[in-house]
Image (cartoon, rainbow, N blue to C red):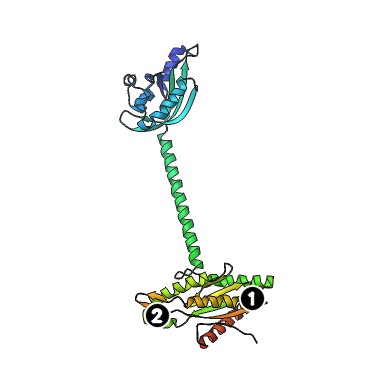
């Protein structure tokens, strides 16, 4: 086996390496570059001798590049590994994984800096694409979550009034029936119906009817306790579930709401539309069935309508 002297060996490694290698002095001027360095940045070895590290550094990166270089030549650190950008002769910018080390003589005096780097543009591109995909995925997840939440709200709320819809009311009534049986505490169920609502639609149109329903909904939701539930039962009917209250307490709450509704006097275009409601209530003191308590509230509502409307009546059991 032929043995090479160290200088020849180092020269062959330097010239054949696929890693770009450049040697700079204390001023940052290039003293020596290998073919891989020239291939990556586009400068010949002769051209490189007229360059400084600033010449191959994008303007935005020069401050950080200088700070790192100063650390090396001042002895603040003996080596660094950084990801940095290089400015090529043709104006292109490439990303590189750079290893730099301070070069010292036998007495420890720093003579220059040896830099070795590889082009990591493909890696950076892949990383950028991955980040973009992650951002898009995160955005898609947020959009999906928002859509799910919106669908959940739509599944529980009446689109016109914003109150709970019949489906949600049925579930809350069922829960209250179970809770009341466990706690042995009474609750009230009431059905409110707009008086003469058909006349409003026939006289002023369905758009006016919609405005009446929305105005009514605001008063209803503003008149109940946080523990109470109100929602649109269907058409112009609204259902109340009032837990943990006495019969008289529930009647007082409902009558207060009825009085507030009668003061609305909705202005639609150039017309003032008076609004009143009739309310039928049923009270459950012990074990009750869903169908029976709703039927009782409906019967009480029927009586309130026939008694002259704009009133609250409670179903009286025999």
- Residue behind mark 1: 246
Q: Which mark is residue 201?
A: 2
In-image side of 192 versus 203 (left or right): right
Residue at x 37% of width, y 32% of height: 60
Check disc 2: other Cα within 10 Å, few if <14, some if 14-19, many if 20+. Answer: some
Residue 164 seen anywhere in this rendered image of the structure: no
In-image side of 284 versus 149 (left or right): right
Q: Secondary structure at mark 1?
A: loop
Q: Secondary structure at mark 2?
A: helix
Q: Furthest residue to the left?
A: 90
Residue 90: x and y in percent read 30, 30
Q: Is residue 157 above or below residue 30?
A: below
Residue at x 44% of width, y 21% of height: 114
| Residue placed most toward the observer, 35 or 273 | 273
> How far separated are the C-alphas under marks 2 and 1?
37 Å
Residue at x 34% of width, y 25% of height: 55
| Residue placed most toward the observer, 99 or 255 | 255
């Amino acid at each position: 086996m032929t043995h090479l002297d160290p200088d020849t060996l180092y020269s062959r490694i330097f010239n054949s390496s696929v890693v770009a290698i450049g040697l700079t002095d204390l001023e940052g001027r290039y003293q020596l570059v290998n073919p891989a360095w020239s291939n990556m940045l586009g400068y010949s070895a002769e051209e490189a001798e007229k360059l400084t590290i600033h010449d191959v550094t994008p303007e935005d990166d020069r401050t950080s590049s200088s700070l790192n270089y100063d650390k090396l030549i001042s002895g603040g650190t003996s080596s660094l590994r950084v990801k940095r950008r290089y400015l090529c002769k043709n104006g292109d910018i490439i990303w590189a994984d750079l290893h730099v080390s301070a070069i010292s003589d036998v007495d420890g005096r720093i003579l220059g800096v040896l830099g070795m780097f590889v082009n990591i543009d493909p890696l950076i591109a892949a990383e950028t694409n991955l980040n973009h995909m992650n951002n898009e995925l995160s955005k898609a997840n947020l959009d999906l979550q928002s859509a799910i939440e919106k669908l959940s709200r739509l599944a529980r709320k009446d689109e016109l009034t914003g109150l709970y819809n019949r489906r949600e009311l049925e579930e809350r009534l069922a829960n209250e029936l179970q809770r009341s049986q466990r706690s042995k505490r009474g609750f009230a169920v009431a059905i409110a119906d707009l008086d003469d609502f058909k006349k409003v639609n026939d006289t002023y149109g369905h758009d006016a009817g919609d405005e009446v329903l929305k105005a009514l909904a605001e008063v209803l939701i503003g008149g109940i306790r946080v523990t109470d539930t109100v929602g649109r039962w269907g058409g112009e009917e609204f259902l109340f579930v009032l837990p943990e209250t006495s019969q008289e307490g529930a009647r007082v709450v409902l009558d207060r709401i009825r009085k507030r509704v009668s003061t609305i006097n909705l202005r639609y275009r150039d017309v003032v539309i008076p609004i009143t409601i009739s309310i039928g209530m049923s009270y459950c003191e012990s074990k009750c069935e869903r169908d029976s308590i709703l039927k009782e509230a409906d019967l009480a509502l029927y009586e309130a309508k026939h008694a002259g409307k704009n009133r609250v009546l409670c179903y009286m059991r025999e």
